[in-house]
Amino acid sequence: MSDNKQILILPGDGIGPEVVPAAVALMHAAALLEDIRIDTVEGLVGGIAIDQTGSPLPAETLAAAKAADAVLLGAVGGTKWEDRPMNARPEKGLLGLRSGLELFANLRPALLFGPLAKASSLKSELVADLDILIVRELTGGIYFGEPRGVEIRDNERVGFNTYIYSEHEIERIARVAFELAQKRSGQLCSVDKANVLEVTQLWRDVVNETAVDYPDVELRHMYVDNAAMQLVRAPKQFDVVVTGNMFGDILSDVAAMLTGSLGMLPSASLAASGKGLYEPVHGSAPDIAGQDKANPLATILSVAMMFRYSLNMPLAADRIEAAVNTVLAAGIRTADIMPQDRAGQTLVGTIEMGERVLACLKQAAGESR
Ligand code: IPM
Ligand code: MG
């Protein structure tokens, strides 16, 4: 086997196969600038895996993900598979990867690129320079809790899930968040529903106990309903936010919209080993799939996170992020980030957006030589 980095590419469904190639091109180009070669293998996950193999997460895909240094994923799901039973849906492929690789720490930065201040649904002064990091627990909580199901009780259907966290699960995600807060502004907000749910009272207690090891971090707690409100009222009060699986799912979509579009947000899902799965926060967007309309920037920025967190190549990450910023500053926009006042902006499709970022990356590197 070569010493090259091995990356598993899982384009998945919907717009996944459109946004992933742009990001893969950036990945190779940024690595080559440092004389590093990356080997890629492609695999199946989600709906396309169901269609071709009968399973949303074929055994070969999980094995390839375990063997790789990191995984890049597009999106899973679509209307075509919506009527399937819960455990045979495309989403199970993604959830199976998260649990199979023990990717318990999901980092979802919501960063507003300056040129996009007008694309936010909030007034630009509320979101200018916004830079929030949501740390979402990803392998526990109500997403995975047992028992779960729908069954007949007393002649009617009853649906149930289990919201469960054990101490070690809370402590390890809290430590990730405290350490990230130390590297950033030193502020951490833990989000729970401790006024109603015992499991999140334990969450709050364990986060408080863990805080003792991080005296330099200023910790506060917030109920999830208040956090949702504060995110749209005064988002800049947040820096690092740590929360459980379901609250993190919801709050990260809210935070994403603050930055202008779900099409801008990358994510990293990390295991204790440093292995990571990188994917855009957005879904498969079946309504625009196959039309060259999707914004590839979230996937491109996910590759930047891959360089930073799994491949230890921070320069490549910086270069990709700078190229994205340059393209945005030049007024290049996919439809989702096009402001109503289109003056000075150029509408482009998925392919052209990727090509523009690639050109900027190469140009900037050429100039700095
Ligand atoms: C996300 C998505 C997933 C989730 C779905 C596709 C299973 O919404 O990554 O935020 O709920 O975690
Ligand atoms: Mg989500």
Image (cartoon, helix red, strand yellow):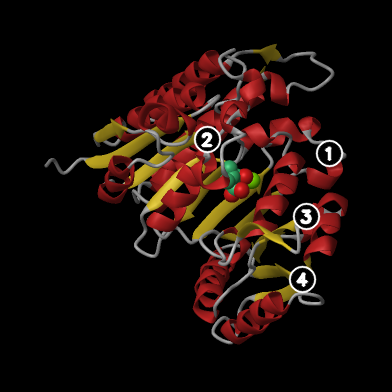
Total count of labels: 4
Residue shown at the point (80%, 31%) measured from the top left: 118
Q: Earlier in the sequence, mark 2 or mark 4?
A: 2
Question: Helix, strand, or loop for circle 2?
Answer: loop
Question: Helix, strand, or loop for circle 3?
Answer: helix
Question: Helix, strand, or loop for circle 1?
Answer: helix
> Looking at the picture, does residue 352 appear above or below residue 41?
above
Q: Quadrant of the N terminus?
A: top left
Amino acid tagged 1 = Ser
Residue corresponding to mark 1: 124
Amino acid tagged 4 = Lys
Quarter of the image for residue 327 reads top right
Q: Position of residue 349 (x, y in %)?
A: 59, 14
Residue corresponding to mark 3: 236
Amino acid tagged 3 = Lys
Q: Earlier in the sequence, mark 2 or mark 3?
A: 2
Quarter of the image for residue 363 reads top left
Pair 3/4: label in front:
4
Residue corresponding to mark 4: 193
Residue corresponding to mark 2: 76
Mark 3 C-beta to ligand 2 under 8 Å: no
Q: CA distance from mark 3 to mark 4?
A: 22 Å
Q: Position of residue 286 (x, y in %)?
A: 62, 24
Pair 1/2: label in front:
2
Amino acid tagged 2 = Val
Q: CA distance from mark 1 to mark 2?
A: 32 Å
Q: Earlier in the sequence, mark 1 or mark 3?
A: 1
Q: CA distance from mark 4 to mark 1?
A: 30 Å
Q: Is residue 367 among the parts visible in the rendering?
A: no
